[in-house]
Image (tube, rainbow, N blue to C red):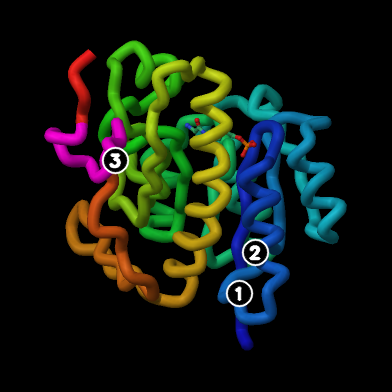
């Protein structure tokens, strides 16, 4: 099988990269990770890539004269590795329109919220503050506007009454690790069609009919005893 070649961009821990690498072990996985680029030296994500036998590159963004020079260096590395798709996996740099255009519809990001809610940073704290009852993560194609772009998939988790940012982040991260390999596989296998700002995705599974939080015994209002 000819697997689609994916370059990964990261800035830190790399647990999402690990999930992508683990899924790529399956013989029928439609993608392979061919390069991991970090804008930060010495991060755990680089070790994870190296341990999986994936070539790594460090491109500290501050070493470049500007964002475009930094991105040109990334593109040169990605091209040299024959990357066809680029997966941002905890990559904490905003990319320019030029980079987005170069990799249009082939540049993917994972974000820790149910977009378009909570773009940007501190998503878990903001979700708790807003009192949302469902939170989660989104895999989307990257566009010029930060954390916007055709959505390939989302995973929702409940926000529980005694959650703090750590417990909520951990629950979302587990969902991220399931969602990202699935979405990248669907894209690599050609199951995504982009129309304007929406992505149409053919999913192999059966969707859940409903996800409700808080949960009643049968989510029926008459089951709730007065207190
Ligand atoms: C993940 O939660 C990812 O969704 C988030 O950073 C974390 C990286 O963890 N990404 C962003 O916030 C991008 N805006 P990881 O390095 O362990 O994958």
Q: Quarter containing ligand 1? A: top right
The answer to whether mark 1 and mark 3 are in CB contact below 8 A is: no
Which quarter of the picture shows residue 138? Answer: top left
Compare marks 3 and 2 and give the one earlier in the sequence.
Answer: 2
Q: Residue 222 in magenta?
A: yes
Compare marks 2 and 1 and give the one earlier in the sequence.
Answer: 2
According to the picture, the residue beneath numbered tag 2 turns out to be 23
According to the picture, the residue beneath numbered tag 1 turns out to be 29
Above or below 136: residue 25: below
Residue 184 image position (x, y, % from top left): 49, 61
Which quarter of the picture shows residue 157? Answer: top left
Above or below 179: residue 147: above
Compare marks 1 and 3 and give the one earlier in the sequence.
Answer: 1
Q: Residue 206 in magenta?
A: no
The answer to whether mark 2 and mark 1 are in CB contact below 8 A is: yes
Above or below 26: residue 14: above
Quadrant that contains the C terminus: top left
Whether the residue under disc 1 has CB within 8 Å of ligand 1: no
């Amino acid at each position: 099988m000819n697997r689609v070649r994916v370059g990964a961009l990261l800035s830190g821990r790399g647990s999402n990269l690990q999930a992508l690498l683990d899924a790529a072990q399956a013989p029928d996985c439609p993608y392979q990770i061919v390069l991991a680029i970090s804008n930060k030296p010495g991060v755990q994500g680089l070790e994870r890539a190296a341990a999986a036998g994936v070539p790594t590159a460090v491109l500290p963004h501050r070493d470049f004269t500007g964002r475009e020079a930094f991105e040109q260096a990334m593109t040169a590395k990605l091209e040299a590795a024959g990357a066809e798709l680029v997966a941002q996996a905890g990559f904490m740099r905003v990319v320019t329109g030029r980079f987005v255009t170069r990799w249009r519809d082939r540049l993917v990001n994972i974000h820790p919220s149910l977009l378009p809610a909570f773009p940007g940073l501190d998503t878990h704290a903001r979700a708790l503050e807003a009192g949302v009852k469902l939170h989660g993560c989104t895999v989307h194609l990257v566009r010029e506007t930060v954390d916007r772009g055709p959505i390939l998939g989302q995973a929702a988790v409940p926000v529980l009454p005694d959650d703090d940012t750590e417990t909520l982040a951990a629950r979302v991260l587990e969902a991220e690790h399931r969602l990202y390999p699935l979405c990248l596989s669907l894209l690599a296998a050609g199951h995504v069609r982009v129309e304007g700002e929406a992505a149409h995705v053919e999913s192999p599974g059966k969707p859940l009919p409903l996800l409700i939080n808080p949960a009643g015994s049968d989510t029926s209002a008459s089951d709730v005893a007065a207190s």
